Image (cartoon, rainbow, N blue to C red):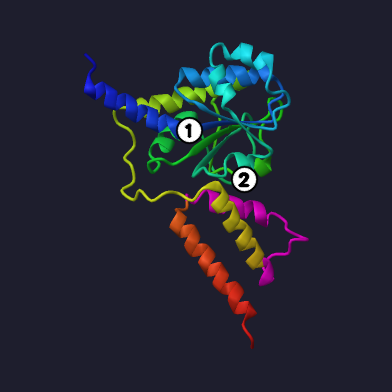
Amino acid sequence: MTNPAENTADQALRERLACLRIVLVETSHPGNIGAAARAMKTMGLKHLALVNPRDFPSAAATANASGADDILHVASRHTNLADAVADCGMVVGTTARPRYLEWPVESPRAMAQAVMALPANTQCALVFGREQSGLSNEELALCQRVIRIPTDEAFSSLNLAQAVQICAYELRLAALSDAPLKLSEDNEPLANARETADAIEHLLRVMERVEFYNPERPKRLPGRLHRLINRSDLKRSEVQILRGFLTAIEEMGQSPG
């Protein structure tokens, strides 16, 4: 007989993993897409998003998927990263090399534990960049968190699919944990990436209107503003408050006298 408790646990695991999305940006080699799909399927992840893949669909991708071609068949395709993560409340970027960032770089394990502590049904994207150059700084600015796999400094080269496998394993391990991080009592959804991006655009527009920001000489303000807002884990209602305040400033500037 089937154990009802086991069925409940399996369902809970599937629900947790169903909110996770692997995003591959401008992948050069189709075999890497297939191998990444295989890595995902072994860990119970099903949602793959592709941003401008060089060659897809491809027989090489199907061959390297080794039975995970069902993931390839339903993979979504996008022209830019912003569209691929627009509905996500948490976007996690990956970096393979040390670089100056204005927020901490975490391990995959720390990231996985934090993801599992998000409000229920929060869509989360884990983003992997190009094989040779990774994610651009502009793409990393769309992320709330950044992770780096702690490889040996003497030889840090990881294949794309290997990196996906490591991160997918950590996510599954965190989802299976008997003692996951305590969920916040406030289960209000986080603002998704599109709502956050719209709020940043609105804020820059108002800053320009009050002559705090000059788009012809932006310096580092837009990038820093993206990082400030993205690392704040804003709730949907908080973004609405911010935008309501910005609208009031705009309307005040339009008032006569």
Query: Which is more toward the observer, 93 or 84?
Result: 84
Does residue 139 lie above or below 13 as drawn?
below
Whichever of labels 2 and 1 marks the residue nearer the N terminus, that label is 1
Outermost residue toward the right?
A: 216
Query: Which is more toward the observer, 145 or 116?
Result: 116
Residue in the picture at 58% in, 33% down: 127
Residue occupied by mark 2: 141
Quarter where residue 51 is shown: top right
Q: Position of residue 163 (x, y in %)?
A: 57, 23
In which quadrant will I find the C terminus? bottom right
Does residue 104 lie above or below 151 as drawn?
below
Q: Secondary structure at mark 1?
A: strand
Q: Position of residue 110 (x, y in %)?
A: 44, 33
Residue 115, numbered label? none
Circle 2 or circle 1, nearest the eye: 1
> In the image, what residue type sits under mark 2?
Ala
Question: Which class describes the residues within 10 Å of circle 1: few (<14), some (14-19), or many (20+)?
Answer: many
Residue occupied by mark 1: 20
Q: Position of residue 75 (x, y in %)?
A: 58, 28
Question: Which class describes the residues within 10 Å of circle 2: few (<14), some (14-19), or many (20+)?
Answer: many
In the image, is residue 232 part of the stretch drawn in magenta? yes
Does residue 99 lie above or below 252 as drawn?
above
In the image, is residue 81 part of the stretch drawn in magenta? no
Q: Position of residue 206 (x, y in %)?
A: 63, 67
Start-end of magenta stretch: 208-233
Q: Secondary structure at mark 2?
A: loop
Residue in the picture at 51% in, 42% down: 88
Residue in the picture at 57% in, 58% down: 199
> In the image, what residue type sits under mark 1?
Leu
- Cβ–Cβ under 8 Å for marks 2 and 1: no
Residue 151 seen by the camera: no
Residue in the picture at 47% in, 25% down: 45
